[in-house]
Image (spheres, helix red, strand yellow):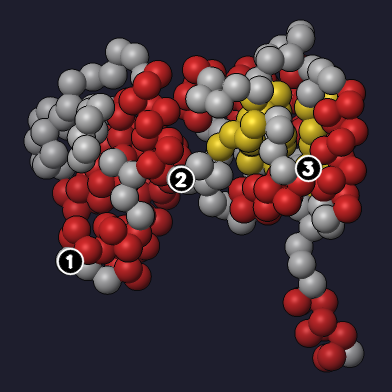
Amino acid sequence: MEHGERVEKTEQRRPRVVIADDQELVRTGFRMILTARGIDVVAEASDGAEAVAAAVLHRPDVALLDIRMPVMDGLEAARRILAQAPGCRVIMLTTFDLDQYVYAALSAGASGFLLKDVTSAHLAAAVRLVDTGDALLAPSITRRLVERFAVGAPHPAARGADSPRLHRDLAPLTPREVEVLGLLGRGLSNSELATELTLSESTVKTHVARIFAKLNLRDRAQAVVLAYETGLVAPGDGN
């Protein structure tokens, strides 16, 4: 029995996925790819409304949502899924690289995006990556997206957490956590953060985890978006 328990613990997790796209061939192809790689597709949807209903019913780990769908587009579907099935993480599907809607998707809480011509291996790897709680986009890529499409962001705030100019959404953070978030917004990795702040990587990870918990962030992609939207980082910072 002990041996059996050890074997069971080493088995690879099988993420549960909902696929939403108005093209049946796309859904079928993605389902075949994911199923062949040990990922369970629990439902398919042809529009955003069906996607929301499927996510609420099946409580998947990941939802793959086309940005452009009839009845309800992928952006609104993402917002509703993340509100009604908070354990689900969202990957947006788009035909065009750097689509302007991708920024809106990240703002809505999506964990990243994929082009529809993604390779089979990349598709499966992306689902597994997001299922672990990581962001699909590298922070530096997210930063470029934000800089290109963010509009109406406030003027950069003073960097100190005790400054009256600090955005109210950042009030729960300590001065050090504000500093870390600002560097996250510029696209720095944990190792780069450690070097910049002369800290160990484990300490940096602790700061990042606390920032996510205090601000209810899902991943680094959302952290980058928030850093811009609160004015903590401005386009061109760190370039």
User: Local crowd at mark 1 within 10 Å, few (<14), some, or many (≥20)?
Assistant: few
As drawn, is 110 to the left or to the right of 33?
Answer: left
Between disc 1 and disc 2, whose residue precedes? 2
Residue 118 picture location, percent across and down:
69, 38
Q: CA distance from mark 3 to mark 2?
A: 22 Å
Q: Nearer the viewer, residue 52 or 227?
A: 227
Q: Residue at x 84, y 57 (%)?
A: 38
Residue at 30%, 35% in the rendered image: 227
Residue at the (33%, 44%) spot, across then down: 187
Residue 83 percent location from the top left of the image: 61, 30
For the C terminus, the image quarter is top left
Q: Where does the image place residue 70, in percent across and percent down from the top left? A: 76, 9
- Can you identify the residue that label 3 sits on? 17
Q: Nearer the viewer, residue 122 or 176?
A: 122
Label 1 secondary element? loop
Query: Along the horizontal axis of the image, is 22 left or right of 218?
Result: right
Is 63 above or below relative to 21?
below
Q: Is residue 172 visible?
A: no
Amino acid type, mark 1: Thr
N-terminal-most mark, 3 or 1: 3
What residue would you read off at disc 2? Answer: 138
Category of crowding for the residue at label 2, using alpha-carbon neighbours closer than 10 angstroms: few (below 14), some (14–19), many (at least 20) = some
Q: Dot 3, how many residues are within 10 Å of its Cα: few (below 14), some (14-19), or many (20+)?
A: many
Quickly name the residue at label 1.
198
Q: Where does residue 120 sit, x and y in percent of width and height?
A: 76, 46
Q: Residue at x 11, y 42 (%)?
A: 160
Could you say whether the residue bearing mark 3 is in a helix, strand or loop? strand
Q: Nearer the viewer, mark 1 or mark 2?
A: 2
Disc 2 marks a residue whose amino acid type is: Ala
Mark 2 or mark 3, which is nearer the start of the sequence?
3
What amino acid type should be assigned to the residue bearing mark 3?
Answer: Val
